[in-house]
Amino acid sequence: MTESGQPFPGGPDLVLEGRFGSADERRYHLVPFSVPPGCRQLAIAYSYTDRIDSDPLAGGGNTLDIGLFDPRGTETGTPGFRGWSGSHKDAFVVGQDWATPPYAAGPIADGTWNVLLGPYKVGPRGCEYRVEIRLDPCLPPLERDLVRTGVPVRPVLPQARDGWLRGDLHCHTRYSDGDSWPSEMLHAAAEAGLDFLGATDHNNVAHHADYGPGGGPLPIVVPGVEVTTYGGHWNAWGTDRWWEFRDPDAAAVERAMREAAASGAFVSVNHAKPFGPPWEYPTARGFHAVEVWNGSWVGLNSVALTFWEDRLRAGERLVAVGGSDTHLLRSDDPDVRHSRAPGNPTTWVDAGGGADATAILRGMREGRTFVSASPAGPQLYLDEADGQILVAVEDGAGTALLLIGDNGTIDARSVDSASWSTSCALPGSSGYVRAQLVRPTGEVVALTSPIWLG
Ligand SMILES: [Zn+2]
């Protein structure tokens, strides 16, 4: 078995075939099949016509996502969910002893299983699919091909203010469409100088066990999931379960976000910008934060910033977070939409001196965050004391500081030294103040969450 689409040796025991038309696009379908008693492993491969990449820039053909449910059920949150691999694994194994990431190993109960098929894109000629299943093929597990091993070498970076930690809140591994293992992503994040890493593979949480808690020479792991719907993506951090992703209707997406938030998770809307893929739920509420900065700033993040700012002006108290969305650490595949560097951008969180995921999540919930272009900064601290707005900037010389409220720019000052601070009176009429550092070219290099006034 390979991940590159080679069929299983020996031929299938079961074949599921069908066709999706344009009316099926972006609607998940369950395709049932029977597993007899005594099975210890299933090997599943699938193919479909007119295949195109899942990249939102690609069109004119088909992209078919796949997942798997065992006989325990198919409803939201069920332990019967054995995994979802989007369109990036043509073949996978689920067995009692091992499974292809992100699928969950465990007992192979007899009864009715369901393949979950999601025609993300359906081209003009429709999508004919074929799913081949082998029962109990006794395949051995693949060897783990680690490239990054050993103790990571941390760079020397400017110190953060006491209690603050720097990290990256968004990345992908082999547990979804990344090319590296969790230990390798942690290694790369450590070598970028990060203190924490948000682990956010798509529509799974099986990566959490592989990551472990991190810490020590490695970044602290903030366990999460990128809930990946056909109308937009949202992150939940501080959760150990999968959240409903199959229903793309706005009400269902909002319901799932609210359920995740009610369970204690911290929830953000991700890459709300063209080709992010974008966020198609302008009226949905129920999230704590907006990923205002995904990958390089020039990758249309000004659109995500506007999405956030429109909501701030409407009185919504939304925290700013950023994420590199790193997928590829080793391959040369073109991936113009995502950063290849953890920490590009970096989210800084006031963890109050704590050094675990709970402290980081608390700081995020309190809105004590800023986002910078890289792990080296610039650092941008915004505080309020005694009727004054206090701003401190490290390593931001040559930029302009903008203080922005709900009526636009309140103040602008040039940052002319490496360690720079300023203060001004609280604006009387604004509901909030946030700070932003901008290069003369207009490129944003740091921005803070708002301080709420009144
Ligand atoms: Zn995403």
Image (tube, rainbow, N blue to C red):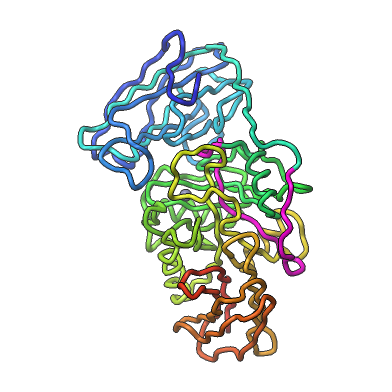
Visible in this render: residue 363?
yes
Residue 230, x across and y down, in percent: 38, 46
Name the residue nearer the viewer: 136 or 33. Answer: 136
Q: How many marks?
A: 0
Above or below, 186 against 439 in this view is above
Tell me the chief SS of the magenta region. Answer: loop
Residue displayed at 25% across by 40% down: 60
On whether residue 157 falls in the magenta region, the answer is: yes
Horizontally, is 40 left or right of 49 in the view? right
Name the residue nearer the viewer: 189 or 453. Answer: 189
Residue 76, x across and y down, in percent: 49, 41
Horizontally, is 347 left or right of 251 in the view? right
On whether residue 444 falls in the magenta region, the answer is: no
Extreme-left residue of the structure: 124
Visible in this render: residue 432?
no
Above or below, 148 against 385 in this view is above
Horizontally, is 33 left or right of 101 in the view? left
Which residues lie in the magenta part? 152-179
Name the residue nearer the viewer: 280 or 32. Answer: 280
Residue 112, x across and y down, in percent: 45, 22
Horizontally, is 26 left or right of 226 in the view? left
Residue 277, x across and y down, in percent: 40, 51
Quadrant of the rendering where the C terminus is positioned: bottom right
Above or below, 312 against 244 in this view is below
